[in-house]
């Protein structure tokens, strides 16, 4: 791999480090040489990822933080600076799932979900950017969206609304921070192959990803053009690219890592059926 794709010695902050997607991204950032600050509301989630990175020979430290509380965000960035060095890269992925529709969601639930999904990325981006600008250092921010942020999703009004807002937050912040050499992009995951997440959940003694989740999501695989769902490592590889010098001219962009979901016209048959009708077998999963 060219050096342009490496992050050796650079400090990357991963916010939202459950055994599923956040852990997958944190592990890939560490494999690319970054020192990873693992930040989560749940101290056990932050510690488990940091421990695994260190066991693999990488550099990482855990930090407990509620992303909706500005004083905790600034204190966490101070702690990261003291322990690992100043943050150069940030990945915003905290989430509270709350599948409610316009008729069933209360105002308090709406405010809470939007606070985690929007206040969190706002506060972390703001304070990381302020510190980078004060130090005259370039850096990057990556916001995790969802295919639900690109299309209307019934029964998930707060989530779909917040993710759509995060897309335009990304573009606006990208233009504002570009003169300072700070790139801001987003990555759109979709329904995820939870096998890696289940394996980590089990090994780390956490109940975040359950076997029934894996089976339920697997049913979605034949709906996507590639006929298999992306894994957390797939998102991690894309996150490394977007943080690295290899992406130095990329800002304000969204990278769908969605097995072709957003590219598919709504009338198109699901991926597996389409492949079958063309006389091909759908692609097998490759790790
Ligand atoms: N799982 C999917 O299939 C999928 C699909 C599309 C997009 N995404 C996006 O990817 C990201 C990760 O998804 P996941 O399924 O791994 O999530 P997850 O629920 O497994 O993990 C989210 C983490 O956010 C943390 N968190 C919640 N509130 C917080 C707060 N106030 N402060 C700090 N941390 C907080 C939780 O403790 C948890 O560890 C999210 O942004 C999600 O919207 C996920």
Image: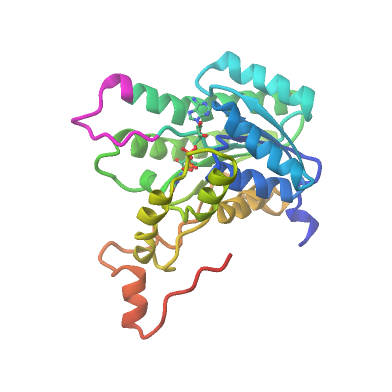
x then y, percent, for residue 272: 36, 72
Q: Nearer the viewer, residue 88 or 237?
A: 237
Query: Which stretch appears magenta?
Result: 97-109
Residue at the spot 76% in from the left edge and 25% down from the top edge: 81
Marker count (numbered): 0
Any magenta on residue 100? yes
x then y, percent, for residue 159: 36, 36
x then y, percent, for residue 70: 56, 16
Check the image and name the residue furthest to the top: 71
User: In which image quadrant can residue 237 be found?
Assistant: bottom right
Q: Quadrant of the N terminus?
A: bottom right
Any magenta on residue 24? no
Q: Is residue 245 visible?
A: yes
Q: Nearer the viewer, residue 196 or 244?
A: 196
Check the image and name the residue furthest to the left: 103
Using the image, determine if residue 124 lies above or below residue 167. Answer: above
Using the image, determine if residue 134 lies above or below residue 274. Answer: above
Q: Is residue 14 left or right of residue 258?
A: right
Residue at the spot 64% in from the left edge and 18% down from the top edge: 74
Using the image, determine if residue 233 lies above or below residue 14. Answer: below
Q: Nearer the viewer, residue 50 or 112?
A: 50
Q: Is residue 182 visible?
A: no
Q: Nearer the viewer, residue 188 or 49?
A: 49
x then y, percent, for residue 134: 74, 23
Q: Quadrant of the C terminus?
A: bottom right
User: In which image quadrant can residue 273 be found?
Assistant: bottom left
What secondary structure is the magenta-colored segment mainly? loop
Residue at the spot 53% in from the left edge and 24% down from the top edge: 67
């Amino acid at each position: 791999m060219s050096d342009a794709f490496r992050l050796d010695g650079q400090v990357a902050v991963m916010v939202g480090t459950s055994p599923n997607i956040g852990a997958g991204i944190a592990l890939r950032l560490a494999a690319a040489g970054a020192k990873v600050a693992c930040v989560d509301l749940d101290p056990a989630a932050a510690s488990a990822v940091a421990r695994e990175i260190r066991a693999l020979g990488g550099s990482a430290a855990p930090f407990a933080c509620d992303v909706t509380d500005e004083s905790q965000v600034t204190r966490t960035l101070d702690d990261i600076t003291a322990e690992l060095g100043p943050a150069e890269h940030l990945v915003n992925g905290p989430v509270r799932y709350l599948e409610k529709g316009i008729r069933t969601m209360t105002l308090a639930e709406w405010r809470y979900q939007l606070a985690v999904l929007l206040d969190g990325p706002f506060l972390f981006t703001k304070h990381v950017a302020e510190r980078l600008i004060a130090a005259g250092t370039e850096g990057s921010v990556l916001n995790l969206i969802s295919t639900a942020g690109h299309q209307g999703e019934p029964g998930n009004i707060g989530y779909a609304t917040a993710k759509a807002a995060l897309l335009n937050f990304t573009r606006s912040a990208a233009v504002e921070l570009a003169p300072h050499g700070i790139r801001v992009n987003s990555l759109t995951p979709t329904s995820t192959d939870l096998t890696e997440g289940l394996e980590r959940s089990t090994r780390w003694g956490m109940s975040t990803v359950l076997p029934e989740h894996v089976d339920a999501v697997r049913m979605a695989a034949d709906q996507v053009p590639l006929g298999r769902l992306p894994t957390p490592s797939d998102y991690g590889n894309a996150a490394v690219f977007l943080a690295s010098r290899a992406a130095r001219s990329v800002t304000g962009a969204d990278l769908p890592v969605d097995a072709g979901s957003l590219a598919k016209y709504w009338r198109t048959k699901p991926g597996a059926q389409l492949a079958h009708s063309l006389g091909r077998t759908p692609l097998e999963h490759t790790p």
